[in-house]
Amino acid sequence: ATVPVTVSEGGTGLLTYNATVGTCTVSTLAAKTLDARLTPREGFDMVMAMQPWRYHMKKDLPTYQPGEQIGFVAEFTDDEALVARNPDGTAAGFRYEQYTAALTAAFQYLKAHNDNLRTEIESLKRKVAR
């Protein structure tokens, strides 16, 4: 099956590739120079700093969808890695693809913290049982 895709600078289709926002990102090692791992704590801090919003899209947008939406606002995002920028420096959008890495790191942080708590609880249970 073929899915029509609009490729444009202005983002006029429901599914749009936009190099600024990064709707389609390259994920192979061949396309990247790795700098450093995003640590679990960094990911956790990024997630905790986010402000999820309920909103309605403005009707004059080409991608208008009726009804309540949920998501993030680029201008309210502290981490620049999560904000796509227009050539003039203004916010173009929120980088949801990038956010998945922060979510993964946050889950890793919480899993490690949970494992540590379980170990501590088991240790305390053994001490109480003596």
Image (tube, rainbow, N blue to C red):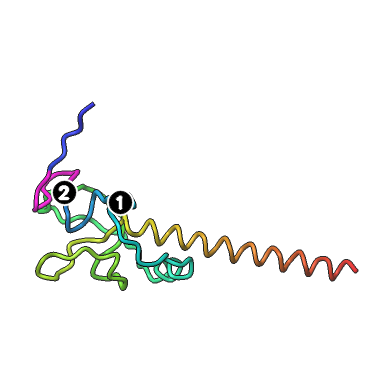
Task: Tell whether 94 sits left or right of 4.
Answer: right
Residue 8 located within the stretch drawn in magenta: yes
Tell me the quarter of the image containing the N terminus.
top left
Residue 18 within the magenta-colored segment of the rendering: no
Q: Is residue 80 above or below residue 59?
A: below
Residue at image location 21% in from the left, 47% down from the top = 66
Task: Name the secondary structure under disc 2.
Answer: loop
The residue lying toward the viewer, choosing from 26 and 128, is 26
Span shown in magenta: 7-17
What crowding class fits label 2: few (fewer than 14 Cα within 10 Å), some (14-19), or many (20 or more)?
A: some
Foreground mark, 2 or 1, reads: 1
Dividing the picture into quarters, in which one does residue 116 lie?
bottom right
Q: Nearer the viewer, residue 68 or 124?
A: 124
Q: Amino acid at mark 1?
A: Ala
* In this picture, residue 62 sits left or right of residue 100: left
Residue at the image point whose x is 31% and y is 58% from the top: 71
Which residue is denoted by mark 1 in the rendering? 30
What amino acid is at disc 2? Answer: Thr
Residue at 13% across, 64% down: 86
How far from the left and from the top, in percent, is residue 130? 90, 69
Quarter of the image holding residue 94?
bottom left
Residue beneath disc 2: 63
Hey, which residue is sitting farthest bottom in the picture?
A: 78
Q: Alpha carbon of mark 2 to alpha carbon of mark 1: how far?
A: 33 Å
Overall secondary structure of the magenta section: loop
Of mark 2 and mark 1, the one earlier in the sequence is 1
121 relative to 46 in the view: left or right? right
User: Percent position (x, y) of residue 53?
Assistant: 32, 62
Disc 1 is placed on an element classified as helix
> Looking at the picture, how far across and down is residue 117, in whole percent?
66, 67
Q: Residue at x 23, y 51 (%)?
A: 23
Residue 47 badge = none
